[in-house]
Image: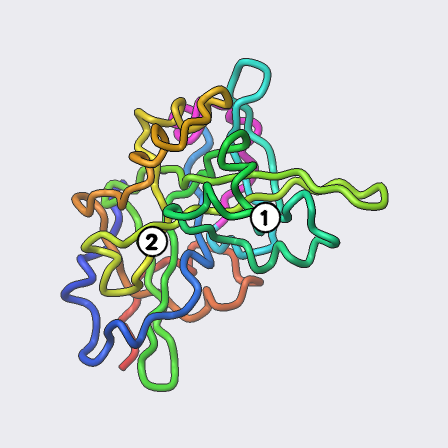
Amino acid sequence: MDAPGVAVSVALPAGAGRRGYHRRVCGRFSFASPPEVAAQVFGVAASSLGAPRYNIAPTQEVAIVRWHEGGRRLGWAHWGLIPAWARDRSLGARLINARAETAADKPAFRGAFKARRCLVPADGFYEWVHQGRGKQPYFIAFRDGRPFAFAGLWERWGEGGETVESCTILTTTPNEVVAPLHDRMPVIVPAEHYQRWLDPELRDVRLLQPLLRPHPAHGMVAWPVSPRVNNPRFDDPACRAPVTPSR
């Protein structure tokens, strides 16, 4: 089913621009595609996908697809990467995103970039634009509503008998749809390159970097949604339903 959005270039109110960007990029996303559709796209069992989610927030458990024992497996990870060397898990709250341009060199991410890459299934994500004293959220998706995957990294952390698997989402410069909303966007991996990104034997950063470009804007749309998405307790279709933007 087609998404109801329109290009944001005609939806943003006057005065919203670069200085109005919300600081955190990709701080919420949605993954509510029918299980049978998502299973076909990602090559995993439909029964493993769980319930639809419309307002996924940092520090929650998120679905990730990775390569395990010769096949793709869907599992769950804490959103906010906890480096193996971290003293406690609190550091993860600050590492929900990693810049694609530098992740391969940063101590928190370089080990995972080489050997623990994953896909984070989604069918849309939210960004915010400051307007006056408030922030107007927008939902960005493909016009045809199909699911897609963010480029992710995962890590395993353990301390005092506790073991946590966590992940982060890579970001890059925005395409023409996202640019009016934010100066960064999550990396969307082209479906034909899923296997390349997941391959644990591929550790040459030079061969991976071409996958981390902004996704072409063609076919992507964005529309204003209700501020109810600001509260992670709300997790229903109304979070991404189109509304008239506030002024």
- The residue drawn where x is 36% and y is 67% is 128
Q: Residue furthest bottom?
A: 133
What colouring method underlies this structural image? rainbow
In the image, residue 107 above or below residue 247: above
| Residue at the extreme top of the image, as rendered | 70
Image quadrant in which you'd find residue 150: top left
Q: Earlier in the sequence, mark 2 or mark 1?
A: 1
Residue range corresponding to the magenta coloring: 37-53
SS at badge 1: loop
Residue 36, given in percent of the width and then of the height, sits at: 43, 27
Position of the C terminus, as image quadrant, is bottom left
Relative side of 1 to 103, left or right = left
Name the residue tied to disc 2. 185
Q: Relative to 86, is 73 above or below?
A: above
The percent coordinates of residue 60 (x first, y second) are: 60, 52
Along the line of sight, the residue nearer the viewer: 66 or 232: 66
Q: Is residue 123 magenta?
A: no
Amino acid type of the residue tagged 2 in the rendering: Met
- Give the residue type that dot 1 points to: Leu
